[in-house]
Image: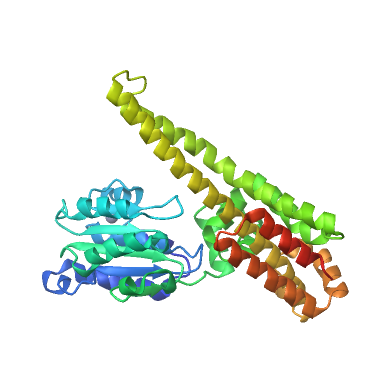
Amino acid sequence: MTSVFDDLVGQEHIIDTLKSAVTASRTVAESQEMTHAWVFTGPPGSGRSSAAVAFAQALICPDQGCGTCNECFSAASGGHPDVEIIRTEGLSIKVEEIRELLTRVAWAPSMGGWRVVVMEDADRLTESAANALLKAIEEPGTRTVWLLCAPTLHDVLPTIRSRCRHLQLRTPSIDAVKDVLINRDKISPAMADFAARVSQGHIGRAKHLATNESARSNRKVIMQLPLQLGSLAAALQAAQTLVDIATEEANSSSEARDEKEIERLQEAYGKGATGRGMATGAAKAVKELEKEQKSRATRMVRDSIDGALLDLASFYRDVMMVQCGNPGSTINADMHEQIDECAGTSSSTSIINKINVTIAARKVLALNAAPLVTCEALMCQLARK
Ligand SMILES: [Zn+2]
């Protein structure tokens, strides 16, 4: 029999825990002991929100998460009345959103089972939002289960995390990602191998790369940048190229979605409605939405730059592997000539330094530093011998 847990790549160590929680949740006596708040942590791409959604499905499915019934489908698509999936596109989750959520989930589950809330980005709760949530987690409705997701435990307020059961996801192995791409997404073995390798265990990124030619050609341009840092002017140009590509990637995926969202909103208000209250209400809502979209676009550009920096780091990591006499574990197998050359002409100290400055740039970027300036500073450092 299929199970929603089958899709959790490389996470066998938590599946037993989830399954036994689901089994226990079925019996009245044991459901008293049901843990009402869980936190799923794991590196980006490990599938923490997929794990939380699978758990939500299993809790409300009559067959404990068959993955094929109506309950399972509607839970995953956000259409189930007892399952709330909170996805944030903006930079933060505000207290108003949490208050509104709390009024929605205060009711008993409509189907008589559990009411499950999956919060995909619990690390983006503002402090006041987290405090509002804390109250609900401290005194949960007896049939409400909270599933929070965050990169690490430190991203969740200590008062909240101390009340949650913690499950730590792992970065799936390259082979596990490759198998999923081949079996689930029907991607050719050679392409799956390449995408799994260069994505370093990030399933979403691997799939995007394997199925998207422009993403592959953009990546190629990024990977050439370390070889083009001969002068200060070239380094600044490389930074500009990196930011341009990342911005274009982010924009191309958000523009179509932005337009659709605005259209849908206008339809909800009755497009072309002439009533005065109607028109002002719609204009205000569109303005709000545009603000949200702008903050989402900012975040997507940052995520995209972060991915590019991770790619750059993988180049220097490969150079270091060759210098250590371990060329077999190369991530960027298609660049072995350039990697060998760089390994022969640079000292290992300088390569380690390049990896460190790239990681440092990712950190300051995560703290909202200006993207272009950060990349310029990085490229100038990478240009040093
Ligand atoms: Zn089902």
Report ligand 1 position as a quadrant. bottom left
Judge from the rendering whether residue 192 lies leftward or rightward of residue 157; answer left or right.
right
Residue drawn at point x = 26 percent, y = 50 percent: 100
Residue drawn at point x = 42 percent, y = 30 percent: 263
Judge from the rendering whether residue 120 lies leftward or rightward of residue 379; answer left or right.
left
Give the quadrant of residue 266: top left
Give the quadrant of residue 161: bottom left
Where residue 231 appears, x then y in whole percent? 86, 59
Q: Please say whether residue 192 is visible from this viewpoint.
A: no
Residue drawn at point x = 88 percent, y = 73 percent: 345
Q: Is residue 199 above or below residue 347?
A: above
Where residue 280 appears, x then y in whole percent? 34, 27
Q: Is residue 301 above or below residue 17?
A: above
Judge from the rendering whether residue 277 lies leftward or rightward of residue 317; answer left or right.
left
Which of the image's four quarters has the N terminus?
bottom left
Q: Give the total number of marks visible in the rendering.
A: 0
Give the quadrant of residue 17: bottom left
Q: Please say whether residue 185 is visible from this viewpoint.
A: yes
* Residue sitting farthest toward the left: 29
| Colouring scheme applied when the structure was drawn | rainbow
Which of the image's four quarters has the C terminus?
bottom right
- Report the front residue among 198 and 378: 378
- Report the front residue among 213 and 352: 352
Where residue 343 appears, x then y in whole percent? 82, 73
